Image (cartoon, rainbow, N blue to C red):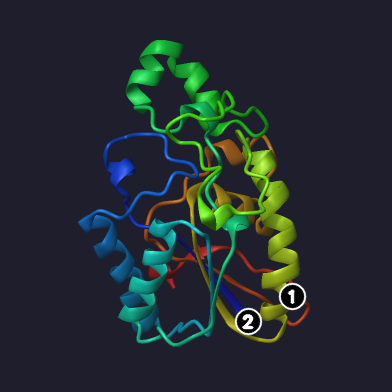
Amino acid sequence: MPSLVLVRHGQSQWNLENRFTGWWDVDLTERGEAEARAAGELLAAKGLLPTVAFTSLQTRAIRTLHLALEACARVWIPETKDWRLNERHYGGLTGLDKAETAAKHGDEQVRIWRRSFDTPPPPMEAGGPYDLAADPRYAGIAIPSTESLKDTIARVLPYYESAIVPVLQAGETVLVAAHGNSLRALVKHLSNIPDDQITELEIPTGQPIVYDFDAQMAPGERHYLKDR
């Protein structure tokens, strides 16, 4: 039976600095690299070896995937990168210190921007320091100016259904290395989590989450691989 393994990228430099990251491209810290390797080592130890991989166009997720695959001796498997697995776009909050933003706008407003289902942050202004219009990886893509989780789901789920589900139906063990909110979008769908409860779900860095599917392609209960 097919299995889907979800791994949030290891700690990034802006995770460490407590800054809103979104679509901005930052790399892993040394701790983040270690988390990615540990995820791959756990896959090997549990005998859940991926046969196909997917990730976003962002360095922290791509490097997490590669470090994990190296640790479980699976660097040779096919991998696909797609912008629809990118992190949620944090709009005008991108690059801001989270604590300073909370001091300015209030804890409750920042909580809404971070965790609400359908309230996006303020949009990013064109031409700012984090504008990605000239980034070649997004050539031809309508880059959002901001996104809520609902907006993120609207791009992640169609990609999941069109690109990942057929691979699972073929019986593969699929590893997706992505981001907190793109993975929340998948978990919400697969675990049927209501809109008003998804705000409480936290996806930890570097901890593989597993869904095993039955013959009818119904996902079982999600569980952490460390508990398997």
Q: Residue furthest right?
A: 216
Q: Which residue is mark 1?
A: 217
Q: CA distance from mark 1 to mark 2?
A: 8 Å
Label 1 secondary element: loop
Seen at 32% across and 54% down, the residue is 27
Task: Classify residue 65 as left or right of residue 15.
Answer: right
Where does the image place residue 73, in percent across and percent down from the top left? 35, 87
Residue 192 disc label = none
Residue 187 in view, yes or no: yes
Question: Type of residue at label 1?
Answer: Met
In the rendered image, residue 224, in percent from the top left (x then y), is placed at: 45, 64
> Between residues 70 and 59, which one lies in front from this camera angle?
59
Which sits in the foreground, 174 or 93? Answer: 93
Residue at image position (52%, 60%) is 56
Do residues under tags 1 and 2 come within 8 Å of each other at their CB atoms?
Answer: yes
The residue under the point 32% across, 35% down is 18
Where in the figure is residue 13, as x and y percent of width and height? 29, 46
Mark 1 neighbour density, 10 Å: few (under 14) some (14–19) many (20 or more): some
Q: Quadrant of the N terminus?
A: bottom right
Q: Quadrant of the C terminus?
A: bottom left
Disc 2 target residue: 2
177 with respect to 163 (left or right)? left
